[in-house]
């Protein structure tokens, strides 16, 4: 521990510069605090934008559902008596999860439980895939879509990719009354509550980080500088 | 040619089974698309570049399967299924397979 301090060679003045780095200030705030603030702001903007896009997409899906509601969908054979010229329809979709879902998944990894937002993302992908398939069937003049199958594909981490196929029976009768099937069983949209939770977690995390930095600086602030730079 | 995911399309009967036909492809998108997808991923939503990639792969696999069926002299492929595999990030394999058959409409003279 004791012994002569190593002499700094000439040209190492930047050491002093680095030594004072933790005390840098801008507008009366430390650089650390500004960094945390910018990270919180960026994440808050991404969360809000993502939630808005998700909401807009939900509205688009509802409109698509209303337009294609008359096409009946079956996973196996069509009901007895339904005939038509078979025509294969297929679609593929790759979706990135909404930022709110990603954030809530991080929170849930700590406290556990059901990740509703993430579940909703996956349901949204399946809804969109089925709707595109129904739209193709409707355009082909089919009222019944049978033999529908889903295949899941992995294309990068976190993304949901689906390949959906079915057989449109061209010339078959559509449902007499509109039936909306994709929305059934889907998780209700609770953006506002989830957004509030996410923003609260973000602010608490930022406050804890800033406080920890303050405590560290108060009690151990100079210690690491002495160890690393041998500065008194 | 009739393509169907059903085993026995209603209103038709199978007069000849010709066997399994398949077609596959592996496709990838260029780096520019990957970068755009990475940016879109920040806010979430559909990654259209990758959707396009899968749709192209699917169409190509179906076309190859159809060509195999034509070679066998079939007029339909029934029980079509799709299989997929992830070949690294940004590339995907799509396999289409089904049974090549000769179909005849029920009301047609045999």
Image: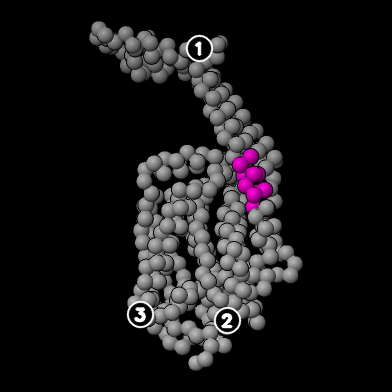
Q: Is there one chain holding both mark 2 and mark 1?
A: no
Q: Residues within 10 Å of mark 3 (few under 14, many from 20)?
A: some
Front position among marks 2 and 1 = 2
The quadrant of the image that shows the N terminus of chain A is top left
The quadrant of the image that shows the C terminus of chain A is top left
**Front in this rendered view, residue A108 or A187:** A187
For the residues labelled 3 and 2, say whether their Cβ atoms are less than 8 Å apart: no
Residue A66, image x, y percentages: 69, 57
Task: Kindly identify which residue carries mark 1.
Answer: A25
Q: Which label number is shown at residue B72?
A: 3
Q: Residue at x 35, y 80 (%)?
A: B72
Q: Residue at x 47, y 38 (%)?
A: B39
Residue A57 magenta: yes
**Front in this rendered view, residue A158 or A109:** A158
Q: Chain of mark 3?
A: B
Label 1: state its secondary structure: strand
Question: Is residue B29 shown left or right of residue A211?
Answer: left
Magenta-highlighted residues = A52-62
Vertical side of A23 occupied by A48: above or below: below
Vertical side of A126 occupied by A106: above or below: above
Q: Residue at x 61, y 42 (%)?
A: A53
Q: Chain of mark 2?
A: B
Residue A138 magenta: no
Q: Which label number is shown at residue B10?
A: 2
Picture quarter containing residue A136?
Answer: bottom right
Label 2: state its secondary structure: loop
Q: Is there one chain holding both mark 3 and mark 2?
A: yes
Mark sitting earlier along the chain (3/2): 2
Residue A2, image x, y percentages: 31, 13
Label 3: state its secondary structure: helix
In space, the residues marked 3 and 1 are separated at their CA atoms by: 78 Å
């Amino acid at each position: 521990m004791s012994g002569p301090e190593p002499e700094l060679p000439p040209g190492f003045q930047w050491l002093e510069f680095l030594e004072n780095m933790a005390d840098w200030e801008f507008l009366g705030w430390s650089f650390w605090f500004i960094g945390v603030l910018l990270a919180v702001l960026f994440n808050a903007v991404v969360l809000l934008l993502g939630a808005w896009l998700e909401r807009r997409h939900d509205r688009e899906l509802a409109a698509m559902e209303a337009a294609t509601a008359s096409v009946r969908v079956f996973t196996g054979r069509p009901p007895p008596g339904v005939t038509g010229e078979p025509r294969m329809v297929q679609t593929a979709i790759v979706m990135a999860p909404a930022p709110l879902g990603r954030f809530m998944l991080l929170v849930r990894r700590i406290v556990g439980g059901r990740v509703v937002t993430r579940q909703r993302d996956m349901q949204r992908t399946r809804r969109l895939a089925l709707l595109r398939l129904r739209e193709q069937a409707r355009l082909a003049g089919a009222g019944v879509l049978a033999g529908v199958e889903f295949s899941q594909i992995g294309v990068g981490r976190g993304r949901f990719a689906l390949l959906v196929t079915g057989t449109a029976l061209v010339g078959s009768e559509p449902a007499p009354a509109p039936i909306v099937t994709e929305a059934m069983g889907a998780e209700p949209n609770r953006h506002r509550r989830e957004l509030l939770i996410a923003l609260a977690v973000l602010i608490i995390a930022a406050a804890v980080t800033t406080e920890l930095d303050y405590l560290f600086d108060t009690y151990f602030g100079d210690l690491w500088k002495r160890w690393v730079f041998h500065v008194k | 040619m009739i393509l169907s995911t059903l085993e026995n399309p209603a209103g038709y009967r199978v007069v000849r089974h010709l066997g399994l036909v398949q077609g596959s492809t592996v496709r990838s998108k260029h780096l520019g698309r990957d970068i755009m997808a990475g940016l879109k991923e920040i806010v979430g939503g559909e990654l259209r570049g990758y959707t396009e990639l899968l749709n192209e792969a699917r169409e190509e696999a179906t076309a190859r399967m159809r060509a195999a069926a034509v070679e066998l002299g079939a007029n339909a492929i029934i029980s079509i299924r799709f299989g997929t595999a992830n070949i690294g990030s940004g590339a995907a394999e799509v396999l289409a397979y089904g049974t090549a058959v000769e179909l005849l409409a029920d009301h047609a003279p045999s």
